[in-house]
Image: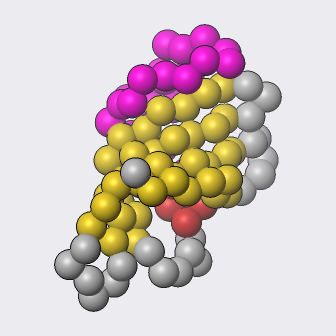
Amino acid sequence: MSTETFKKEITLDKWTTYQPLSSDIKQIFNEALNGFVGVIYIPNEVAFELTEKTDYRFKCYAYLPHSDIFWEAIVEIQKSLGVKSHITNITKL
């Protein structure tokens, strides 16, 4: 499902339920985490809220490189028109 389809199905200022990632949404995640070092995050699902910008909550599996320890986390990312997406918060679950 494309970003545009998602936007048509939700109301402004309300979070969507968690949904599978589209290629457009995964690109936003990858852009925000480009250059991020340390923990590796693998996104599984996404919820988002539309206001004057778009806020995303990615449910992820997380792990340290060369480690057998995995955990879940929420990576919050913000994307505004014409601006690179960026991480606003990471919460370990």
Q: Position of residue 11 (x, y in %)?
A: 60, 11
Image quadrant occupied by the N terminus: top left
Vertical side of 86 occupied by 17: above or below: above
Q: Nearer the viewer, residue 37 or 82?
A: 37
Residue 83: tell me if it is visible. Answer: yes
Which residue lies at the image location 27% right of the left edge and 67% below the top edge? 70
Give the quadrant of residue 20.
top left
Which residue lies at the image location 67% right of the left edge and 46% below the top edge? 78
Q: Position of residue 56 (x, y in %)?
A: 56, 40
Q: Using residue 53 as the reference point, say whether residue 56 is left or right of it.
A: left
From which residue to which does the magenta span run? 1-28
Q: How is the rendered protein coloured?
A: secondary structure
Q: Using residue 69 as the reference point, say whether residue 27 is left or right of it.
A: right
Which residue is the extreme one toward the left? 68
Q: Using residue 26 as the reference point, say whether residue 35 is left or right of it.
A: right
Q: Nearer the viewer, residue 80 or 63?
A: 63
